[in-house]
Amino acid sequence: MKKDNEKGDESMASNYIRFDWAMKRLLRNKANFAVLEGFLTTLLNEKIVIQKLLESESNQEDEFDKYNRVDMLAENSKGELILIEVQNNNEYAYFQRMLFGTSKLVTEYINRGEGYDKVRKIYSINIVYFSLGSGKDTVYHGKTEFRGIHQNDVLELTPFQRQTFKVDAVSQLYPEYYILKVNDFNQVAKSPLEEWICYLNTGDIPDSATAPGLEEARERLKLDKMTKTELEAYYRHLDNIVILRDNIFTERAEGRAEGRAEGRAEGHAEGRAEGLEEGLAKGREEEKKEMARNMKSLNIPLDTISQITGLEIEKIRDLKI
């Protein structure tokens, strides 16, 4: 769905606002909860009603938040916590970040002196716009279960535990993780979940899409409902995402090329392997430095740059823009 932007000569890639921007600006409004509820209902395959949104320390409203993850913490009608994170830039330790996020919520949302039966159920939903891990699918689901070493049986709850906790399996007591690698989706959407992934990837909502929440998104997430100032900020956001991705892809390609060149120069199998590894490592290091330089030029705080790139603050301070 493409059309010309009537307010200028540039063309719109889509009629609708990207989901990450909508999360920052629009979906926090209770009137727009239906969009988020539809997405969660489709993903979790159960009816989700958002009771309220909770504060999250990484919600930032300044111009530099484009380099950080966008996250939203919601509580549903069953008192469960749903953490939604959108990550635009590459982060090699993102799996650990997911673990840290859920662990922090476990401890933050239980009062001192309360029994362990008060630990909240947590869903960690991660929408990533980079290549995370190695896999062929676009949606991954992770949960905790205990399997016997000798019998390969799954440890189950007792009837009393089922009745008390109102769940059927041990895994339902633990945090569950969802990873949506939306950049990898390049096919025709044939299911409600794929319709959502298509929107997350392209910003388009086909007329044929019927997934819960997308009809509300059609009505509430239109670009033509934004003010001129909001549109300008939105387009800057899109431009910066493109620049960031180009930097990442370029440095990664250069690192691979340099690694292959150094490997060939060794002339032996062992030398080629070592050269390749050294070249890749050097490429990754240069990729981080280039990303840090770009962020320094935008006056992003050094501790934030360090957290995103993994570089030490002293190294970042010494980088020349």
Image (tube, helix red, strand yellow):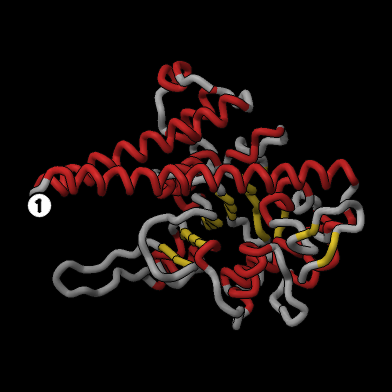
> Quick one: 140 or 316, which is closer to the camera?
316
Query: What residue do we see at 75% from left, 53% from top?
Result: 27
User: Does residue 264 appear left or right of residue 204 in this picture?
Assistant: left
Residue 110 at least partly seen? yes
Residue 156 pos. (x, y %): 34, 70
Classify 237 as above or below 39: above
- Residue under numbered circle 1: 269
* Residue 164 coordinates in the image, percent (x, y): 48, 64
Q: Would you say 193 lies left or right of 305 here?
A: right
Which of 64 and 290 lies nearest the eye of the viewer?
290
Task: Give the image location of residue 42, x and y in percent.
Answer: 62, 72
Comparing 220 with 72, the one in front is 220
Percent of width and height locating residue 117: 47, 53
| SS at badge 1 | helix
Q: Tally the numbered discs.
A: 1
The amino acid sitting under disc 1 is: Ala
- Residue at left 60%, top 68%? 197
Instruction: Tell me the quarter of the picture where residue 295 sits.
Output: top right
The answer to whether any part of residue 96 appears in the image is: no
Quarter of the figure with the C terminus: top right
Where does the N terminus fall, quadrant-wise? Answer: bottom right
Q: Residue at x 55, y 57 (%)?
A: 127
42 on left or right of 161: right
Please report the residue visible at 62 percent of the width from the left and 56 percent of the height from the top. Answer: 79
| Depicted 245 relative to depicted 108: above or below | below
Estimate how packed mark 1 is, as few (under 14), some (14 to 19) or many (20 or more) residues with alpha carbons within 10 Å. few
